[in-house]
Image (tube, rainbow, N blue to C red):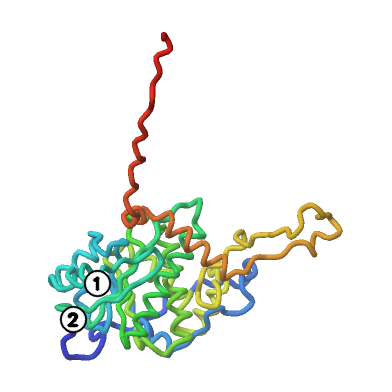
Amino acid sequence: MRAPGAAGAGVARWAASAPAPLTDYAGRAPPVHAYPVFPYDHQINERLAIWQGDISTLEVDAITNTTDETLMESNIVSERIMQCAGPDLKEEIITRGLECRTGEAVVTRGFALRCRHVVHTVSPKYVAKYHSAAESSLHNCYKNVLHLAREAGARSLALCVVSAPRRNFPPDVAAHVLLRTVRRYLEQHSQPQLVVVSSACGAELGPLLALAPLYFPRSPREADAARWRLRDEGGPEGEPVHPERRIRIIHNPHSHSADTAEDDTSLCDEDAAVEAAAAFARACSPDTQLLLPPTAPAPHVARRTYDTDQ
């Protein structure tokens, strides 16, 4: 259980960090956005911290564990969490028969950890050919972790970088998804009051610090400069938006003509496309095979032979 003390004690808030030197974009190419997509908001910046270290040592209400579908994956984050939680955490996973599909999350108790809850999630594997599905599924990981932490009553959450190197996610792509999802969630919900984005190593920390000013600008000038640097503003919940995933459907291909092309086609619902992409990412996960029932061997059929010489 968590030791007495303020949540996230000793972790500096993003609002207290000094803005980086800004590039003067005046006179250069026009900005990508006409106005700041993520405006300066000191109160939201007070609810964010970016920190490097052992997530199991943080005094928060909930921490995140990046794992596989059996919740037993061995990586730098999960090994430390399982070790510090003691055998009770593993016993709860086994006793409750817990499993977690890619992009989803489940909650357990923290046991000997300093937190009350552990939110486990499964990151998709990144394949460049299916990058939109992978990014949507990664967004779902973070959104579901935030949602379950809020449902559990957590006022503070340590959110690790769930796209571990073995998932092959480009660090900058993963950082964009994480920061954009957290920003939109904090805009729309009052809890958790504090989100500590925890990195296990410098390779994870670097992209987070470099890209955080785009989503959490620390001054109006920093927000304005992001108009040139920010490319994908995402959807209402921070989900990735990929125009190439908008599928055109022909209602009646036999009567389709150039004159009626606009009437005969429609765009699929974006929410349905996001869910389909997430489902596809789950299906592509190598961990999915661990949950499939064993295939029964084909029944043996006795074959009758005939003597053709008779």
Viewer-side label of 1, 2 = 1
Residue at which label 2 appears: 114
Question: Which mark, by number, is residue 267?
Answer: none
Q: Where is residue 184 in the image (x, y as percent from the top left)?
A: 48, 80
Residue 36, placed above or below residue 273: below
* Residue type, numbered disc 1: Arg
Residue at which label 1 appears: 96
**Mark 2: few, some, or many residues within 10 Å (few <14, many ≥20)?**
many
Q: What element carries label 2?
A: loop
* In-front residue for pair 33/166: 166
- 87 relative position to 195: left or right: left
**Residue at figure coordinates x 35%, y 55% from the top left:** 292
**Residue at figure coordinates x 35%, y 31% from the top left:** 302
The outermost residue toward the front is 310
Q: Where is residue 171 in the image (x, y as percent from the top left)?
A: 39, 61
Looking at the image, do the residues carrying marks 1 and 2 touch, with CB atoms under 8 Å apart? no
Pick the quarter of the image with the N terminus. Answer: bottom left
Residue 280, placed above or below residue 113: above
- Where is residue 100, by image quadrant? bottom left
Q: Where is residue 150 in the image (x, y as percent from the top left)?
A: 36, 85
- 237 relative position to 73: left or right: right
Could you tell which of marks 1 and 2 lies nearer the N-terminus? 1
Q: Position of residue 207 (x, y in %)?
A: 39, 66
* Residue type, numbered disc 2: Arg
